[in-house]
Amino acid sequence: MSRILVRGGLVVTAAEETYADVLVEDGRIAALAAPDSACARDWTADRTIDATGKYVVPGGVDAHTHFDFPFGGTSSSDTFETGTRAAAWGGTTTVVDFAVQTRGRALREGLDAWHAKAEGKCAVDYAFHMILSDVTEGSLKEMDLLVGEGVTSFKLFMAYPGVFYSDDGQILRAMQRAAGNGGLIMMHAENGIAIDVLVEQALAAGRTDPRYHGEVRRTLLEAEATHRAIQLARVAGSPLYVVHVSAEEAVAELARARDADLPVFGETCPQYLFLSTDNLAEPGFEGAKYVCSTPLRPREHQAALWRGLRTDDLQVVSTDHCPFCFSGQKELGRGDFSKIPNGLPGVEHRMDLLHQAVVDGHISRRRWIEIACAAPARMFGLAPRKGTLAPGADADLVVYDPHATQVLSATTHHMNVDYSAYEGKEVTGRVETVLSRGEIVIDERRFTGRTGHGRYVPRTTCQYLT
C-alpha cells in the first residue's frame, strides 16, 4: 500500500475545522499535523496531493441504498458495481444496503443472496441492514444471530400490505427482540392500510396521474405512523430510527419524542430537501420520475426538515437511492400511478447537494459532515473506522473543491439510470479526489478505482446508545 500525503487543505470533520496535512499509510490515517509543523515538514510519501484552497473531508457514509432491489415487478437499475462506482464519484466511500427477507424464508437466505450480489462487485466499502418482512418465531431468533455477525439493524414496514407490511403486533415483537439483542429497528412509517383505501378510491375516480401518488400518501398518515412507531418502541423499550422523513408533522413527532429523552432518531433525504410536489405534477408523464415513498411534499415542508437537521431532531441525510429508468420501468405505471416503481436516483449527488445547503446557509460545514459522514457512521456501528479523519481511521478521504460549479444532469452522472432527478440544477462544490482505504479511486475527476476493491464491513451496534 502506498504512502500518500494530502497537503495544505482545510480539514473539516464533525468536530472541528483546521488546516492540516494528512498522512495516509497502509490504508489508514496515520497522522494529521499543522502544515508548518516540524513533523509535517519531515513527512515523505509516494504521492503528494495538493489540497490548497480545498476542503479535506471524510468519505461520505450513505446508510440507505437499494442496489439491485426487486420492486413492483422489476428491479432497481443500479447494481452493486454501477451503484458503488457512482457513489465514489460523489465522494461516498461506504454504503449500507438492504438485504431482503422473502416471506416464508429465513433471514439467512436473504442475507446470503445479498452477499452474493455484492461480493467482488463493489468499488467502495459496504455493509447490510436486514429487511424483516416476515416476523415469526424463527426470524426473531435469527435476529440475535445476525447482530452477532455485524448486521445490527432491521427494517420493518408499516406500508405495502401484502409485500413488506408488518402489523403492530409483529412490529412490537421485533422491537422487543431488538431491545434484548442491541439491534436498531428502522421504520418505514406510513399507514399503508389507509393509503391503500385512498389509492383504490383515487383510481376509481379516474385520478391516475403521477401527482396522485403524493396526494393519497397523506402527510397525516406519515405522522400517525411515526407516532405509533414511537409508542410501540416505548412499550418495547427499544430504540427507533425512522427512515426517509418527509413531512413537517412527522418531524414534530420525532421532536416531541427526543424532547422526552427517548432513543428515537430520524433520517431525511435530499429529494425532500430540494424537490417537491411541483415535480410530481410535471406535465405528461414526467412526474413519474419523482415517484418515491414517502412521497415528495409541498415545498413548505422543507423549512421544517432543514430546521430538524439544525436542531438534531433529524440526525442523518441518506439517499434512499433506488433508481428505476423512466423508459421501460417508470412507464409501467402509465394510466395507474400505483404501478409506478417507487424510488429515485441520488447516491452520486448527496455530498454535493448538502454542500449547496452550506452555500445557501441552511447548515454549517461541520454539520454537513455530521449528517453525511459522522452521524450515519455512529448510528450504524461503523465508527471510528468510518465517518471521520483521525489516526487509526480508514483512509476514506475526499479532497473537495468548494468553489467549482457544476450542472447536475443525466448526460454527466455515473448512475445507471436514464434521467436525473436534479436535471439542470447548478450547484457550487465538487468532489475532486477520493481515497477509499488509502486507494485513490477518483483522481482529479478520473475514475481510477476497480470493481472488487470494496470490502464488506461488519458493524457494531448503534453507538448513540452506549
Image (cartoon, helix red, strand yellow):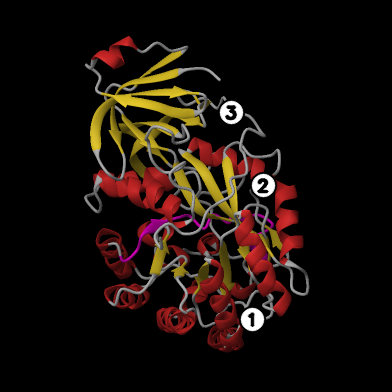
Which is nearer the N-term, disc 1 or disc 2?
A: 2
Residue 343: name its quadrant: bottom right
Q: Which residue is mark 3?
A: 449
Q: Is residue 236 left or right of residue 39?
A: right
Q: Secondary structure at mark 1?
A: loop
Q: In the rendered structure, which amino acid carries the disc numbered 3?
A: Gly
Provide the residue span drawn in magenta.
313-332
Q: Are marks 3 and 2 in contact (CB under 8 Å)?
A: no
Q: Nearer the viewer, mark 3 or mark 2?
A: 3
- How far across and how far down the image is residue 113, in percent? 75, 55
Q: Nearer the viewer, residue 11 or 234?
A: 234
Q: In the rendered structure, which amino acid carries the disc numbered 1?
A: Pro
Secondary structure predominantly adopted by residues drawn in magenta: loop
**Residue plotted at (31% across, 40% down):** 13
Which is nearer the N-term, disc 3 or disc 1?
A: 1
Q: Decide whether residue 390 is among the magenta residues.
A: no
**Residue plotted at (74% across, 61% down):** 108
Q: Which residue is mark 1?
A: 161
- Residue 145 numbered tag: none
- How far across and how far down the image is residue 299, in percent? 33, 66
